[in-house]
Image (cartoon, grey):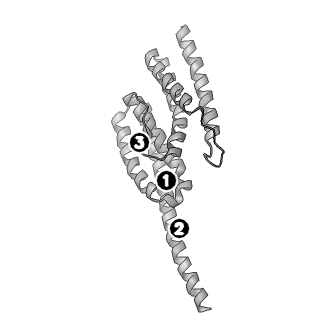
Amino acid sequence: MNDIENDIREVSKILDNRQRQFDLAMDTSRKLVRIAAQSITLMHNGKKEDAQSKLIEASTLLGSLVKSEEFKYHTMQSMQEYAEAMIFFKIKFSRQLPSIEEIGVDGDAYIMGLMDVMGELKRELIGALSFGKIEDASFYYESMLKIFDSTREIRFAEAILPGFRRKQDVARIQLESASIEMLRARKD
């Protein structure tokens, strides 16, 4: 029985280490989500430097998450939130749709972040319209349209890209709603 007891002790040590790594990844993931959300709020409030500072902090956290590849499934949400915040920052302050390389996440997180940023762009569009800034609203609408049109052909099973179809449907609804808002503004 000694061999089994030794084996169990060794397996237990390995699992203890894996548990510590998992706990660290989950803690980092929660922090990343919180900081990404804070940066988005700062962006909506026009606080570019503060938002940028938060994104630098988030980037550091992302670096440690990327190293914990074993827990990618569990940390994907935070990577999507980071991607959304980075994409929104680039669109809002640089007036460009960033590449996956510029964002620094994998393809899944990038695509999901693109879908999520549609809500932030719609919020900016509505804000611009409320101040009579039709040109700014048009820019946000065109950005939404480009994102949606670029991702329209993506059709994969839920097992391949979990949650994407739902996000794509929500993005379509947001785009249609933004289109109606733009039509109303142009009539006035």
Q: CA distance from mark 2 to mark 1?
A: 15 Å
Q: Which residue is mark 3?
A: 101
Q: CA distance from mark 3 to mark 1?
A: 21 Å
Question: Looking at the picture, how far across and down is residue 29, in whole percent?
Answer: 49, 53
Q: Height in image: 65 above or below 178?
A: below
Q: Which residue is mark 1?
A: 29
Instruction: Name the image quarter holding the N terminus.
Output: bottom right
Q: Residues within 10 Å of mark 1 (few under 14, many from 20)?
A: many
| Contact flag, marks 3 and 1 (Cβ < 8 Å) | no
Image quarter of residue 149? top right
Q: Determine the residue located farthest toward the bottom in the rendered image.
A: 1
Residue type marked 3: Glu
Q: CA distance from mark 2 to mark 3?
A: 31 Å
Question: Looking at the picture, how far across and down is residue 11, in whole percent?
Answer: 56, 77
Point 45% across, 54% down: residue: 66
Q: Which mark is residue 102?
A: none
Q: Can you tell which of label 3 and label 1 is closer to the viewer?
A: 3
Observer-nearest of 4 and 130: 4
Which element is circle 1 on?
Answer: helix
**Quick check: 19 left or right of 58?**
right
Point 52% across, 61% down: residue: 70
Q: Of label 3 and label 1, which has the lower sequence position?
A: 1
Point 52% across, 74% down: residue: 14
Please indicate, yes or no, whether residue 45 appears anywhere in the rendered image: no
**Quick check: 3 left or right of 136?**
right
Q: Which residue is mark 2?
A: 19
Q: Of label 2 and label 1, which has the lower sequence position?
A: 2
**Quick check: 17 left or right of 96?**
right
Q: Height in image: 87 above or below 71?
A: above
Question: Looking at the picture, how far across and down is residue 173, in whole percent?
Answer: 63, 28
Which element is circle 2 on?
Answer: helix
Q: Height in image: 149 above or below 16?
A: above
